[in-house]
């Protein structure tokens, strides 16, 4: 074993303190187990993202743990913090901490952990039963440096969220998915720092609740509302611009939108560039091509739809498609966007329908014994099958028959059809071509 590494068992230090801690596993206990030299090999020198922090003199854990700056301790049964001095000694450099799917139910225990991780910027507390306790402002203050906070499936109340927003002045990203919200509660003071909000898979249906998010987060850049059943955007255009002045991206995936007027209202967001609209009732009756083209044509400022970039070429194709789609619709039912595009492109004629399917049959001239007959032949049959078709006409057995194909537009002479299994369509036979039949000479 490398010199300078303390081989004392850290678990003994925890057993001595066990009586002073809540039942269950502590953060520090799990940390020691996961990042012990046996499970996380010791490295000398500048490791790849591995940091061995200097610890206070006399620490029983000195030189024992090799911690990266990103700690993942999800699904470990953690219920409490453990020794705060040990946390402070080993986590001074940690910037990201994943504590999701543990058994933390007391915000005070979370605070003990976070307050001793001074460089922490990302914290994931998803699927911890934290709704069972009240978050006090003194506890929330320990989170003050966090910029990204994940509270998915934590059932955090809006009161808890408000407390967090008050105490996290630099919070930029907040995840509140799967929390069973049916309404939104506004705090007394709005949060200007938040740029991204994920609030998917809740029970938000009324636009009156969604508009509160604009009031709460005036600097919001990205709003992810997927898998809520928002049924309409009931807001005047000028009001939408004031509510979400900085919104660049919105996801309404699997929402309840049923009207094209709601899609048109997305144009009211002055900075909107990206939209996700898959799985909404409005688009169900349309084909895949119609869905994308009709939406692209209605949203001239959107440069990315459902994750795919809208190129200049696609936009023009979609806008022309839009004009043709509504060309025969009664004037009173034509959307306003149609008139805008008519001004841009003029009235367009419907595209000619071109059948690109391969030809299945052809009418050819069959020449034999100085006779000519026009015969319709199937092009999916083989040369052998064609001989059987012509057997009665030319009065020759198939074994004595020689066939030659002559393309009336080609500069070459006749081509012998010598391979019995070859399909006729491979010759490129068309109406007006000729087939010559001769008898084999003995």
Image: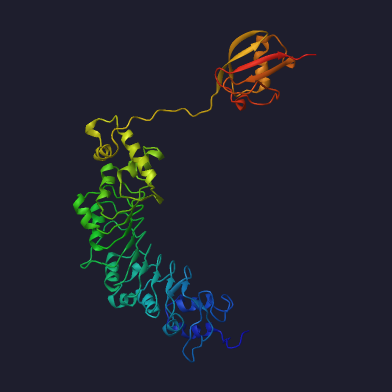
Image point (21%, 33%), residue name: 332
Residue 257 at least partly seen: no
Q: Which residue lies furthest to the bottom in this view?
A: 58
Image point (37%, 40%), residue name: 317
- Which quadrant: the C terminus? top right
- Residue 27, image x, y percentages: 45, 76
Give the image quarter of residue 391: top right
Placement of 388 over or under 359, stated as above or below: above
337 displayed left or right of 94: left
Q: Residue furthest front?
A: 411
Image point (28%, 51%), residue name: 205
- Which quadrant: the N terminus? bottom right
Placement of 279 over or under 17, stated as above or below: above
Front-most of 26 and 370? 370
Front-most of 427 and 24? 427
Give the image quarter of residue 419: top right
Front-most of 213 and 250? 250
- Residue 155, image x, y percentages: 34, 63
- Residue 285, image x, y percentages: 36, 37
368 displayed left or right of 183: right
Query: What count of labels does the image hold?
Result: 0
Residue 435 at least partly seen: yes
Colour scheme shown? rainbow
Q: Which residue lies furthest to the right in this view?
A: 442
Front-most of 122 and 382? 382
- Residue 247, image x, y percentages: 29, 57
Give the image quarter of residue 213: bottom left
Placement of 151 over or under 342, stated as above or below: below
Placement of 375 over or under 296, stated as above or below: above
Image point (47%, 27%), residue name: 355
């Amino acid at each position: 074993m490398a010199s300078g590494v303390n081989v004392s068992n850290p678990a003994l230090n925890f057993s001595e303190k066990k009586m002073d801690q809540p039942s269950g596993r502590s953060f520090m206990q799990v940390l020691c187990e996961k990042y012990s030299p046996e499970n996380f090999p010791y490295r000398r020198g500048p490791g790849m993202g591995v940091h061995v922090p200097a610890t206070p003199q006399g620490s029983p854990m000195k030189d024992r743990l090799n911690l990266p700056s990103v700690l993942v301790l999800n699904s470990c049964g953690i219920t409490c913090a453990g020794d705060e001095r040990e946390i402070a000694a080993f986590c001074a450099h940690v910037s990201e901490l994943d504590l999701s799917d543990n058994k933390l139910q007391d915000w005070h225990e979370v605070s003990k952990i976070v307050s001793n991780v001074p460089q922490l910027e990302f914290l994931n507390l998803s699927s911890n039963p934290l709704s069972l306790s009240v978050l006090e402002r003194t506890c929330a203050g320990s989170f003050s440096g966090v910029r990204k906070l994940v509270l998915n499936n934590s059932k955090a109340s809006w009161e808890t969220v408000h407390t967090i927003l008050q105490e996290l002045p630099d919070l930029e990203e907040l995840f509140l998915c799967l929390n069973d919200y049916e309404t939104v509660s506004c705090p007394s003071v709005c949060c200007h720092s938040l740029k991204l909000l994920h609030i998917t898979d809740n029970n938000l249906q009324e636009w009156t609740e969604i508009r509160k998010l604009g009031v709460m987060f005036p600097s919001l850049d990205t709003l992810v509302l997927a898998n809520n059943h928002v049924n309409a955007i009931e807001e005047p255009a000028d009001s939408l611009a004031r509510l979400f002045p900085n919104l660049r991206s919105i996801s309404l995936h699997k929402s309840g939108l049923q009207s094209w007027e709601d899609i048109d209202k997305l144009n009211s967001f002055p900075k909107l560039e990206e939209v996700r609209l898959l799985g909404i009732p409005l688009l169900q009756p349309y084909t895949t091509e119609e869905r994308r083209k009709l939406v692209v044509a209605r949203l001239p400022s959107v440069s990315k739809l459902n994750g795919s970039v809208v190129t200049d070429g696609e936009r023009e194709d979609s806008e022309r498609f839009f004009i043709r789609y509504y060309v025969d619709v009664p004037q009173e039912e034509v959307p306003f966007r149609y008139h805008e595009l008519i001004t841009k492109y003029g009235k367009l004629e419907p595209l000619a329908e071109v059948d690109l399917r391969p030809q299945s049959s052809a009418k050819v001239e069959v020449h034999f014994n100085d006779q000519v007959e026009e015969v319709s032949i199937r092009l999916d049959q083989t040369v052998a099958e064609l001989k059987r078709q012509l057997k009665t006409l030319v009065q020759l057995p198939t074994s004595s028959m020689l066939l030659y194909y002559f393309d009336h537009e080609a500069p070459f002479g006749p081509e012998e059809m010598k391979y019995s299994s070859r399909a006729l369509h491979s010759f490129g036979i068309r109406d007006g071509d000729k087939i010559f039949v001769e008898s084999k000479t003995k």
